[in-house]
Image (cartoon, rainbow, N blue to C red):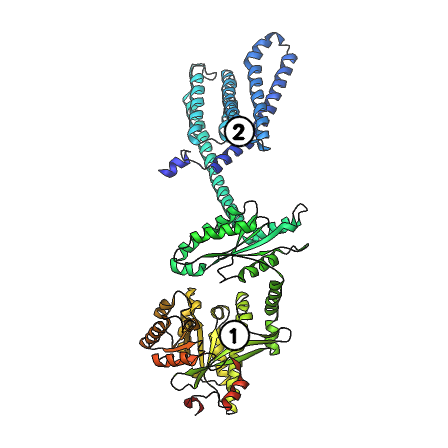
Amino acid sequence: MKAILNGLGFEKNSKYVRDYFFTTNMRASIYMSLVVIVLEVWMIIRMTVTIFRDNLQSNMMHYIEKYYVNYFILTFTGIIMLILAVRFMRGKKDNRYLCTVVKWVFTLVCIYFGIKISLNDYSKGEQILTFLTMELFSLCLLTWKPYIAFVLASASYVYFYYRMNEMVAVNTGEVGTTVATQINFFIMWISTMMVCIANYNNTRMQALKDENLEKVNTYLSKISIEDELTGIHNMVYFRNEAEKVLSYVTTDRENAVFLFFDIENFKSYNEKYGFHEGNELLIKVAHMIEDSFKGSLVSRFSDDHFVVLTRIDGAKNIIGHLSGEIKKLQREVHLELKCGAYKPVGDEADVSLACDRARFACNSIKKHYDRTLRIYDKSLEDKFQLKHYIVNNIDNAIASGYIKVYYQPVVSTKNGCICGLEALARWEDPNYGLLSPGAFIEILEEYRQIYKLDQYIIEAVCRDYRDASDNKKPFAPVSLNFSRLDFELCDIVGYLCETVEKYGVPKNFIDIEITESALTDQQDFLPNAIKNLRSFGYKVWLDDFGSGYSSLNVLKDYQFDVLKIDMKFLSGFKDNEKTRPILENIVSLTKQLKMLSLTEGVETAEQFSFLETIGCDRAQGYLFSKPVPIETLRERISAGELKISPELSA
């Protein structure tokens, strides 16, 4: 039923479809009015020539009343229709109401003209082609809703038939129409209506297709420059527009500044309240930043990061106000808005580099709760150059042997002897000297290059084991640190198995450390990877336990062999009375879960003694040794400073 009503024009069309119909009718009106004008001018000329040729001037008033008036009225309305339709198609949209009125007048005049002329023709025994032509012109060339066409066609056909039926038919000499004429007339009405309905529905279907296409194009155009979640501009738009702004001669480059915003602790907020709440927070913050920097370029960079190109004047006050507003949004998780700023120097126009430097400045104050803003300066420039040096030279450093494996002993609390080693990377660079992991690990993770380093460490550790085994040198099981990205960027488990087999390393000599934070990213591949590692015979450790917000959930959802307690628990050992009972309970929990416990960050004999007392299985820290090269470790073992557990040296 609904489809029938829609087909008859009773549905409510969208604005796009209504506009499509109107434009279609204006285009058709141009063709229709041109044809009408040409025909009527021809008819006027033809009749005038006939009158003067046949010397009928004495009947001029008769011809004027019967023909000329109709011709001139139709021609005049056709000209008006043509002018308005052409103006509309050229973009003069302000005359739409007038166009509608004239369209109706033009249609009614055409129908009236068809009736008037064809009645004259019928009275002479001629065909009623003018009426049929005008019906088709006005009701079929123009597109009407079927129910409107029905009213117009029915009224005109009924009126025309009524007038015909009052006249004497030339062929019969009697008043009224014949049965054949009645049947033909009814068929003509049906045909007119069918054409009207078909024309309307074809136009409507095309309008709906075009509307859908328009929506798709609008959506594609929108997402090409707009961030899908927050609704503000994305980085594609930002880069393009920022380049234009920087190139304008009217731009005050001296006061231009790039700002990079980061919501600190957003990840913890997401974990605690869920992705929906996290997304709502991002949307609020995005629009707060956009509203605060009206007239400036504002975009979402990625995740919980935003960038702004604005004037430096007053920016500091705006940032301070924003920081205060963000704090009002926090609940149990502390939120901080951090901002890094970079002022382009001279003719610099590299937007990506400017954003990267502003981001670097922002990252430099993370975890500094007393600072909200950091402006990029010379000291940061040096660090920034080091960052790019690391990214660009990691492959060369591996190939040239600049990456070294340092080993830090893990000792048993039962006898104080080495029961394991942790493999840690050090970069001995010819230009920068010795680089600690803190200088390059996060950078390699940020640029998704960390798997190259971790694969190299696997190879180096297995090689060291083979050398120790072949030359009867002391060695202990080694724990390797795997990044979450290792599992994402390469088949790290497959690579480990191949390398272990290549060097003939026993599976019980390789342990895998996975940080607690890596397991809170809700990546589907990590649970399977951990299961695979354990099924292949490797022990898996949970590293940095207690450093995040989901520690107990991680213990519930995953199976580990060793729990490595974060060094922060020992940082307040002397002064914080809560430290000892917390550690004691964690160690007790590991025993209940059938795991070994290992506490890192041990620096004093008192701490080690306490760990031994509460039953912690292993310890690691500067009390025993800093990370050192394998040669140094062996020298200390040979000198008696460190001892290998009897079961390993046997």
Q: CA distance from mark 1 to mark 2?
A: 70 Å
Residue at point 46%, 85% (across, down): 476
Observer-nearest of 99 and 423: 423
For the residue carrying disc 2, how many other residues have a C-alpha within 10 Å: few (<14), some (14-19), or many (20+)?
Answer: some
User: In the picture, which quadrant includes the N terminus?
Assistant: top left
Observer-nearest of 644 and 145: 644
User: Which residue matches tag 1?
Assistant: 454
Q: Is residue 638 visible?
A: yes
Residue 113 placed where, x, y %?
52, 20
Q: Is residue 537 visible?
A: no
Q: Kindly report which numbered mark, 1 or 2, lies closer to the viewer in this rendering.
A: 1
Q: Residue furthest left?
A: 592
Residue 580 placed where, x, y %?
36, 74
Observer-nearest of 116 and 205: 205
User: Which residue matches tag 2?
Assistant: 96
Of mark 1 and mark 2, the one earlier in the sequence is 2
